[in-house]
Amino acid sequence: MKKIYITTPIYYVNDNPHIGTAYTTILADVLSRFYNITGTQSFMLTGSDEHGQKVQEAADKREVSPIEHVDEYVLRFTELWSKLNIKYDDFIRTTEKRHQDRVKDMLNNLWEKGEIYQDEYEGSYSVSEERFITAKEIEDGNFKQIIKLKEKNYFFKMSKYQEDLIKHIKETPDFIKPESRKNEVLGFLKNPLNDLCISRPKSRLSWGIELPFDDKYVTYVWFDALLNYITAIGWNVDSEKFNDCWPADYHLVGKDIITTHAVYWPTMLMAAKLPLPKTILAHGWWLFDDSKMSKSTGNIIDPLKLIDLYGEDSLRYYLMRDMALGQDANYNLDKLIKRYNSDLANDFGNLVNRVTVLIKKHYNNMVPEPGDYNENDLKIIAKSKKTIQNVIANFNNLKIHNAIEEVMSLFRDLNKFLEINEPWKLLKQDSDSLIAATTLYISINALYIGTQLLHPVMPKKTLEISNMLGASEINIINEEFDILKPNNAIGEGRSPFPRIEEK
């Protein structure tokens, strides 16, 4: 059976990881974990983009070799992913032999098919983006350090596939998400598509993958980097692994790199006679006071500092809860703390403490035996099962923030259910109260369902809470309600969500 294949962009090692790169990688991890707990095997890929002019210049400035430079800088990303509890299946580096060899295979393949040719080109070149840009792109004002450049290079016949790409986008509703990004790409494709310059002369740039058919050139960094999605899964060397994963189910990217992923990459695949990815999802930006985060404004948020202050699960929760996929979201530390206190400390954490403390005190740490269900009991059980359906539907529609809200709604209803039944009062009056036992039995099982559903978002804390509830692991999610059986022993501990003092 094909695995669900989920990718992040490979991150440019010269940049520090920031809240945006953390968000994309957490999103991929959350989706991957979700599929695993619903019984579908996933494969998550992330990695690092390590070639290009800026890497070469940075290494020269530090008086080290480019490979020494990237070996050191890639640790910024791997260490952050470890701290964020990212469970990737592979981390691809573009300096690895397995990647470079397959890039050369693809270049030879396209060269022999006549999909690549040599020509002299004169045009506007963005030094910061390391590529030739169009007049419209200059007009849009998104590029800096633009110079006029004339040189002989190799070109990929991208324009040949323009109409085929437009047709595919229009006929495949899920190919580009959200709709606004799809319309942006179709707008870009209304203008004639240029062929793609895929080489750089070694006289200008030596740090890259050498063209196998001309040793005076190296491969353009984007052509090299995009191929990571197939080189990591064994294209041209391991057909079983490749067929298990490809085509990718989700390419997760920021909206600023939608053109390379939705135009360059599909045309490269078309030329290679390979299937296109199923969905390219371009999420929005995390803003700071409604402004894009950037080095120049000094408003970049370091996720490592937030992890040290509030823990990785709290950050994961906030980022998943407060961004609707496809839209921009405003980062605000006060909002993060308020969201944590409201959802995690109050609604979730207090519920955990309420239920487990009563069971420990009155039932000798054992899940109580329930009596017959009344109308309110049946409503909570039905709500729990409906929450499972709604969360799965929202995940499948990439509405992670809505999926989380479904779980929090269940927790709020559970808190009301406890407040109406008041088992703490009933047990003071009668230690054998059947209504109290039934209330707590329903509550601990509904609480465990919600905990399972939040596991992809907060894997560490939900496992701690599952252990407190008497489950040693997160089970495959189904619509069974009575998972924690009567007389099952519950575990020790208190809610791992203490309140944070608000300023």
Image (cartoon, grey):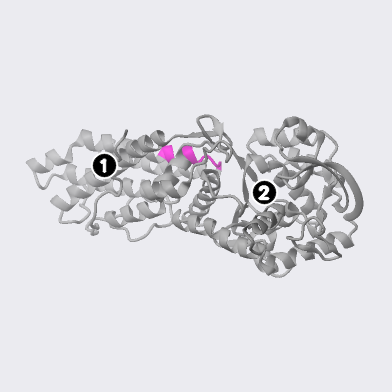
Give the side of residue 358 with respect to residue 265, left or right: left
**Which quarter of the rendering shows the C terminus?**
top left
Residue 264 can be seen, yes or no = yes
Give the side of residue 390 with respect to residue 123, left or right: left
Q: Residue furthest left?
A: 429
- At horizontal 42% and vertical 47% (from top left) the residue drawn is 305
Q: Is residue 398 magenta?
A: yes
Residue 51, placed above or below residue 173: below
Mark drawn on residue 55:
none
- Circle 1 is placed at which residue position? 350
Q: Report the front residue among 400 and 268.
A: 268
User: Looking at the rendering, which quadrant does residue 212 occupy?
Assistant: bottom right
Residue 217, placed above or below residue 398: below
User: Looking at the rendering, which quadrant does residue 383 occupy?
Assistant: top left
Q: Specify the amino acid type for callout 1.
A: Asn
Residue 229 can be seen, yes or no = no
Number of on-image labels:
2
- Circle 2 is placed at which residue position? 278
User: Looking at the rendering, which quadrant does residue 146 occupy?
Assistant: top right
Q: Specify the amino acid type for callout 2.
A: Lys
**Coordinates of residue 20 in the picture (x, y in percent):** 54, 43
Residue 194, placed above or below residue 229: above
Q: Earlier in the sequence, mark 2 or mark 1?
A: 2
Q: Report the front residue among 202 and 325.
A: 202
**Coordinates of residue 488 in the picture (x, y in percent):** 24, 59
Look at the image and give the residue range highlighted in magenta. Answer: 397-406
Q: CA distance from mark 2 to mark 1?
A: 41 Å
- At horizontal 23% and vertical 57% (from top left) the residue drawn is 492
**Which quarter of the rendering shows the N terminus?**
bottom right
Question: Which SS type dominates the magenta stretch?
Answer: helix
